Every structure is written in structure tokens, then in C-alpha cells.
Image: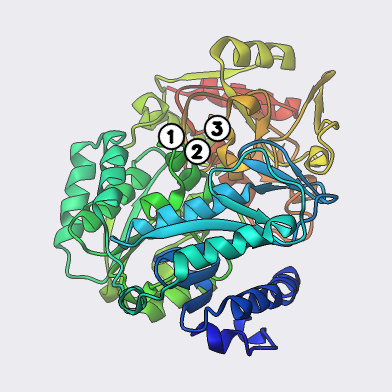
């Protein structure tokens, strides 16, 4: 809309979406009237303004975009100095909660936009109209209540005189992969090595005429690698593709390893809104860890009428709301299905995976396996192995997460040793964050990832009765109110199959430990 139309608005309810929070509504009502007055005083009537502008192929939204001589991406904050402390160059603490530094936030929006839209002169700015004190760390234009004259000069310098061609160009922009995005994808591909089987599946998918493709595979079969390579291939061919995952960890880990924001690789997190910008232009949607989807996600994806490629493992369904088997939601003539038979984790020992499946799901057929699997006699031994191997520890969720709200408290106490769960604010990068190497991960911080060695704490939510493994959901913090048979076993299946070279285990249930030992002796 034109600025002259914007300054007449008195009710911003038209910006509301289904999941708009009360805090967002309050922020509009406090910040936007201030902008209206400034814009009116400066005579910016013919400039174009976009509110809550959704970035191409992303969930992220820019508070305000202004188009005149140049383009301004503007981030608004209602923070005041009595509520806000700048922690470092990456984070601020507001009302005792950690938030991404607004300067990094708005610069990230600019980079994400420029991955799909070229040849725009974009300036970024942050306006904190309730603050008078400045930040020490800032790499963009930042303005406060006391520097409002500087903000006015910035707006005039970048917006006047109005370039009407610039407005038309922005409004008619057709977002598509730029050389910068291709460069980022090249770096991603350098991290990936594919087997013959994985390459064959990629070629078959690329040649498929089906709009629905299902790829099923056990842990370590390379589902995520194939998904990322397909995503990269499509984008490089200027075929608009999105890589979706409901599991945040893989998305953030891959991007952190390349020191890029997920959006800079076209990796999109499946949030509650689930509607990224420009979705109508997307041709292919690749869904990783698809067993974690919910019914509403499947319904939405079906309505889009796009090529959908699902990667999943039914036995990695770990929550009641997870759909598990994706194939149940399509008729057989709708889809093409590929099954990855080889696995490249657990020292390439298929027999070890079969052992874990047999023991968890009470099946027969234990076979001797060549894989480093160690049952620890006590927790001191368990921690010594962890330190010697510089390994990460994961656990069933049977301990209350006390440190989530109080970082001075411990969560797990075993044989006199005290440990904490992974950092709540950075749980999705726990596996690569050195500051968390002595914290304990759970299913949500490890699913989709792998390490050389992993230590697993098997808790009281898994038990032995009549010589068979049973689940005790009342012992699990997540399943006390709602549970579906098999979920706890699926969780331990994931935890016990994350390591490439070796897994060491501590059992809080001594009977269960002896049962595992007996089954190991049964291997022939």
C-alpha cells in the first residue's frame, strides 16, 4: 500500500493470522502509530510500505518494508533499557528471556531475500522507540528514541525522491534461485558422499512421473542426505524446491556447520502456520523425517498440488501426534515407493540393527554382530567411557527438566552423579555445541543426526516382564497424560542407532540390564 493509505489506518486487526499472538498485536498497536506520525511529517506519501512482509519461501516476516529511492527492511522493537540487556553480539536478554540480536535478525532477512531476488539496493535498520541507551554490538543502522532525528534523516536519504520503477520492480519480483544460493548449495554438497544405492534412488526420483514419491529407510540409510541432494539439484536447475522438516535439529545443524542461516539453504522448519511465502511458485516439496508430520500437515500438502517427496521411517514415530507410516494417507496408485535397504551407520552392521529390533520388539532371530556395543556395570564406568571417547550422552525422558527454567539446578542424578539436560534455548544444536558436551540429549535433540560414539541411558520407562520388554509410560515425562503403544520402544531404537562406531549403555533397571546381557549371549 502507499504510505498515504497507511497513515490513515487506525485498526491493525487486518494483519492478524490464525496463530497471531497477543504480544504481536500489542506491538503493532504501539509501534505502527509512531511510524505513521513520522512518515506523515516527512511527506513519504508516495512511497510503498509492506507490513509483516513474508520473505520468499520462508516463514520469516519483516516488520516493515519501505520502497522509495531504495528499499528499507525495518525491524521494530518495543524493548526499553530497564527490560533489555545486550548479552553479546548475537543475543539480547529481555524480561529474562534470550532473543536473537535485532541487528543480526534484520541482516538475516536481507540475506534471505537476496538469495531469491537480485539487483535490489536494500538498507537495513532497527528502531527501538522505547530505548534511549545504545547497544554496543551492532552491524546495521540502529535508532532509539533519543536519535529519532537520525532516523528521520535515514528515511529521507533512502526513500526520497521516490523511484516508481523501483516500486514496480519490487512488487513484480519473481523470486528464483540466485548465484548466491547456488554457491551455498555447492558448499552443502561438498559435505555429502552418496553410495551407489542412494544415487540410484535419486535418479529414479528425478525420472519419476508420479507427484507423490515415498522413500523409506532404516536409521543410517541416508534418507536426509538424499533429500538434501535432491533439494540442491532442483534449485540448481531453477526448479523451485523447498526442504521441509518438523525436526529442527538436522536443519539447524547443517546450517550451523556451513555458518549459514537455514533460510540461506532453503531449509524450512514446519511451524504451526506452515505457509511460507510464495508457496504457489514452488514446484517440489521435499519432506524429511516425514513420520513426524501431523494429519493437518498431510492435508495441507495434498491441497497444494505439488510434487511431494517424503522421507520416513515408520519406527521412528516418537510422539502420539506423529503420523508414522506416510503411505496410509495415499492410495497405492498415487505414489511411487523406494525402500533403502543398505545402512551406513553402526559400523555398517545390519546385524546390530536387527539385534536392536529383535530385543525391543520381542522378536526372535538374534545374530552375532560386529559392532562396538558395551553394557556398563555402573555409572562411573559409563562416564569414564564418555570422557575417554569425547562422546555425547542421550537418555529416555524420565527426569524432570528442572534446569529449563533454572540453569543452576540439575536434572538427572544417578549413583551420586548429577547431570543436566541440554540447554533449552539451544537444544537443536546440542550435538555440535561444545559448550553442551557434558549435557544430556533426548530424542528431540538427536533424531536425524549421528556421532562416532553415543552413550545411552536406558531408564525406567522400559522394563522386563515375563521375559518380554514392556513400556511404562507413567515413568516418562512426556507420556504421563497421553501414550500410544510402541512409542517408547521407537525412541530407544533411535537412541541406540545414532552412533557410527560404537554405543555404550547404562541401565537404571538392573533386571533389564541382565536381560540385554542374556540376549547378547544368545547371538549366534
Q: Is residue 176 above or below residue 231?
A: below
Dividing the picture into quadrants, the one containing residue 462 is top right
- For residue 303, what is the image quadrant? bottom left
In the image, residue 127 sits, relative to residue 46, either above or below, namely: above
**Marks 3/1: CA distance?**
11 Å
Q: Which mark is residue 25?
A: none
Q: Does 121 sit left or right of 72 as displayed?
A: left
Q: Which mark is residue 431?
A: 3
Other residues around mark 1 within 10 Å, as few (<14) / some (14–19) / many (≥20): few
In space, the residues marked 1 and 2 are separated at their CA atoms by 35 Å
Q: Which residue in the protein does label 2 denote?
A: 358
Nearest to N terminus: mark 3 or mark 1: 1
125 or 44: nearer the viewer: 44
In the rendered image, which quarter contains the C terminus? top left
| Separation of marks 2 and 3 at Cα, in angstroms | 28 Å
Check disc 1 and report the residue beneath it.
Answer: 257
Q: Residue at x 64, y 26 (%)?
A: 435
Residue 93: x percent and y percent? 75, 45
Tell whether 114 sits left or right of 414.
Answer: left
Whether tag 2 and tag 3 are in contact, CB under 8 A, the answer is: no
The mark nearer the N terminus, 2 or 3, is 2
- Give the total number of marks visible in the rendering: 3
Residue 505 is left or right of residue 221, and the answer is right
Please, what secondary structure does the residue beneath circle 3 have? helix
- Residue 19 found in image quarter: bottom right
Residue 214 in the image, given as x and y percentages of width and height: 32, 61
Q: Position of residue 330 (x, y in %)?
A: 37, 74
Amino acid at each position: 500500500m502507499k504510505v498515504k493509505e497507511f497513515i490513515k489506518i487506525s485498526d491493525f486487526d487486518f494483519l492478524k493470522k490464525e496463530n497471531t499472538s497477543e504480544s504481536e498485536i500489542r506491538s503493532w498497536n504501539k509501534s505502527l502509530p509512531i511510524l505513521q506520525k513520522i512518515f506523515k511529517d516527512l511527506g513519504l506519501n508516495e512511497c510503498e510500505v509492506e507490513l509483516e512482509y513474508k520473505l520468499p519461501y520462508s516463514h520469516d516476516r519483516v516488520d516493515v518494508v519501505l520502497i522509495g529511492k531504495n528499499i528499507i527492511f525495518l525491524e521494530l522493537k518495543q524493548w526499553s533499557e530497564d527490560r533489555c540487556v545486550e548479552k553479546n553480539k548475537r543475543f539480547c536478554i529481555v524480561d529474562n528471556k534470550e532473543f536473537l540480536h535485532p541487528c543480526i535478525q534484520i541482516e538475516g532477512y536481507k540475506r534471505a531475500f537476496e538469495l531469491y531476488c537480485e539487483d535490489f539496493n536494500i538498507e537495513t535498520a532497527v528502531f527501538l522507540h522505547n530505548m534511549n541507551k545504545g547497544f554496543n554490538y551492532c552491524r546495521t543502522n540502529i535508532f532509539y528514541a533519543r536519535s529519532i532525528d537520525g532516523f528521520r534523516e535515514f528515511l529521507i536519504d533512502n526513500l526520497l525522491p521516490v523511484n516508481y520503477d523501483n516500486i514496480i520492480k519490487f512488487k513484480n519480483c519473481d523470486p528464483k534461485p540466485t548465484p548466491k544460493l547456488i554457491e551455498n548449495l555447492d558448499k552443502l554438497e561438498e559435505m555429502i558422499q552418496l553410495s551407489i544405492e542412494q544415487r540410484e534412488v535419486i535418479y529414479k526420483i528425478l525420472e519419476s512421473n508420479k507427484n507423490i514419491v515415498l522413500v523409506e529407510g532404516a536409521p543410517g540409510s541416508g534418507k536426509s542426505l538424499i533429500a538434501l541432494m535432491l533439494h540442491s539439484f532442483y534449485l540448481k536447475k531453477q526448479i523451485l524446491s523447498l526442504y521441509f522438516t518438523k525436526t529442527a535439529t538436522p536443519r539447524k545443524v547443517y546450517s550451523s556447520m556451513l555458518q549459514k542461516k537455514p533460510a540461506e539453504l532453503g531449509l524450512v522448519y514446519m511451524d504451526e502456520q506452515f505457509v511460507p511465502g510464495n508457496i504457489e511458485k514452488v514446484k517440489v516439496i521435499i519432506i524429511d523425517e516425514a513420520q513426524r508430520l501431523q494429519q493437518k500437515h498431510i492435508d495441507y500438502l495434498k491441497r497444494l498440488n505439488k510434487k511431494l517427496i517424503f522421507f520416513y521411517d515408520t519406527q521412528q514415530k516418537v510422539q502420539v501426534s506423529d503420523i508414522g507410516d506416510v503411505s496410509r494417507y495415499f492410495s497405492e496408485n498415487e505414489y511411487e515407493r523406494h525402500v533403502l535397504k543398505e545402512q551406513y551407520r553402526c559400523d555398517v552392521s545390519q546385524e546390530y540393527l536387527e539385534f536392536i529390533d529383535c530385543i525391543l520388539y520381542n522378536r526372535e532371530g538374534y545374530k552375532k554382530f560386529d559392532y562396538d556395543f558395551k553394557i556398563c556395570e555402573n555409572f562411573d564406568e559409563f562416564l569414564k567411557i564418555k570422557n575417554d571417547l569425547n562422546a555425547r550422552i542421550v537418555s529416555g525422558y524420565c527426569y524432570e527438566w528442572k534446569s529449563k527454567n533454572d540453569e543452576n539446578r540439575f536434572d538427572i542424578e544417578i549413583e551420586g552423579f548429577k547431570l543436566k539436560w541440554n540447554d533449552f534455548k539451544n537444544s537443536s544444536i546440542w550435538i555440535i555445541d561444545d559448550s553442551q558436551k557434558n549435557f544430556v540429549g533426548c530424542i528431540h535433540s538427536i533424531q536425524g543426526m549421528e556421532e562416532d560414539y553415543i552413550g545411552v541411558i536406558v531408564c525406567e520407562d522400559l522394563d522386563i516382564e515375563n521375559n518380554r520388554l514392556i513400556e511404562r509410560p507413567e515413568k516418562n515425562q512426556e507420556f504421563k497424560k497421553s501414550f500410544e503403544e510402541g512409542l517408547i520402544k521407537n525412541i530407544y531404537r533411535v537412541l541406540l542407532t545414532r552412533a557410527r562406531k560404537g554405543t555404550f549403555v547404562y541401565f537404571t533397571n538392573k533386571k533389564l540390564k541382565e536381560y540385554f546381557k542374556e540376549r547378547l549371549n544368545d547371538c549366534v
